[in-house]
Image (spheres, rainbow, N blue to C red):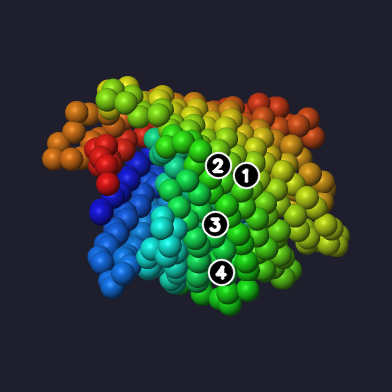
Amino acid sequence: MLHASVFGQFLYEPGDRHRTGGFATDQFSSVNWVMGMARRQVSAGRLGLRLMASLEPWTVQNCGFINLLANGEVCEGDTIHDRQHPHDLFMELAADYDRPLVGSLRWQLYGGLAGEPALGPSGFPHRISAMPNPIAPITHHWLDSSHITFGLITTGLYERRWKAEVSFFNGREPDENRTDLDLGPLDSISGRLTLMPTSRFVVQLSAGHLDDAKAEFPPQPRSDVDRASASATYHRVTATTVWATTVAYGLDAGREVTPVGAVDLITHAALLESNLTLRERHTWFARIEVVGKPGEDLHVHEAPAEVFVVGKVEGGYVRYSRGWKGIVAGIGGTASANIVPAALAPRYSGRVAPGFGVFVTVRPARHQM
């Protein structure tokens, strides 16, 4: 199996008045990835090899693409805010082995140098409800930021309607060198239960402890994070339409290290995203998010331990071509409203800061495995 997605985008978000490093409020960039997978029968089971890579270390500059209220990871000796960090060159380098046990019960073993542990919903690059949208969720680091983990092993049991998994992994966020493998001890743990009551509806519940996960302002040490997540995804596919919707909730509990001392915080995030495609030509997508972010994450240094509830409402449209040799191209646009409390209004030119984008995209045509 070979799959890929490429976006070339121009983004304009004029509302940020506290951007550092001389970054502009408009930007050209490209978010992209390619994924390959091969499987073959080995004895009574099936062995699979997986590779996923991205050119974003070279196509997304200035510590990430513009995305008001996003945060996470580090760049140029500082934590990133109001930008979405680029993905690493290697997003997955892993293998899995799957075999039957008794009746319909099966056992799976998955692991590698890079991959996704059993924690949270599928990463946003993989979610059908998110795939037409080039903009990452601002709830990413509460829901699915561990989708690129450098070093992991996962084991699980499953049948047609359920799956139970446990992972041991390196929970540390990647550093700003996006082309290497940031390997570390497998000292984090997570577990996930996935239920599929029908072929269209999937629910997951998961929780984990991420050791030394979060990078703080240098020279402060990394901090641990305890994370819990729940999500539900609904897909409906017919001959002429594809409709996909995800609702998700995440909780992060950890110690926020600030210049005035360390404080224990619990923060929450919620997401609702959906898209509808008609006749493989017209796609409408939307996303609504609400999340509590510590002031330190948004560089509000005068109130580093205060939690600010922020939100983002986003919508967009893509017009796809008819396709050529299994490849389709599209052109689209996005518009967003970034909503902040009154205390942050001077930093974002008001309580509602707008955002706009236009993009072109190339991806494989709709297919089945």
Which residue is rendered at x = 27% and y = 46% of the image? Answer: 369
Image side of residue 12 versus residue 255, left or right: left
In the image, is 256 to the left or to the right of 69?
right
Could you tell me which secondary element the residue under label 2 belongs to? Answer: strand
Query: Label 2 vs label 4: CA separation?
Result: 23 Å
Q: Which residue is mark 1?
A: 230
Task: Give the residue pinned by disc 3.
Answer: 164
Rendered view: 72 above or below 241: below
Q: Which mark is residue 169?
A: 4
Which of marks 4 and 2 precedes in the sequence? Answer: 4
Furthest residue toward bottom: 185
The answer to whether any part of residue 271 appears in the image is yes
Task: Kindly identify the amino acid type of the residue bearing the numbered disc 3.
Answer: Ala
Left or right? Give the position of 117 relative to 37. right
Viewer-side label of 1, 2: 2
Q: Residues within 10 Å of mark 1 (few under 14, many from 20)?
A: many
Circle 2: is it few (<14), some (14-19), or many (20+) Cα within 10 Å?
A: some
Discs 1/4, front: 1
Residue in front for this viewpoint, 356 or 50: 50
> Can you tell which quarter of the image residue 213 is in?
bottom right
Residue 313 appears left or right of 244: right
Sequence-earlier tag: 1 or 2: 2
| Mark 4 or 3: the one toward you | 3
Q: Earlier in the sequence, mark 1 or mark 3?
A: 3
User: Mark 1 or mark 3: which is in front?
Assistant: 3
Q: Which residue is mark 2?
A: 203
Residue 218 is situated, as x and y percent measured from the top left of the image, at 69, 67
**Mark with earlier residue (2, 3):** 3
Mark 1–mark 2 CB contact (< 8 Å): yes
Residue shown at the point (80%, 53%) measured from the top left? 265
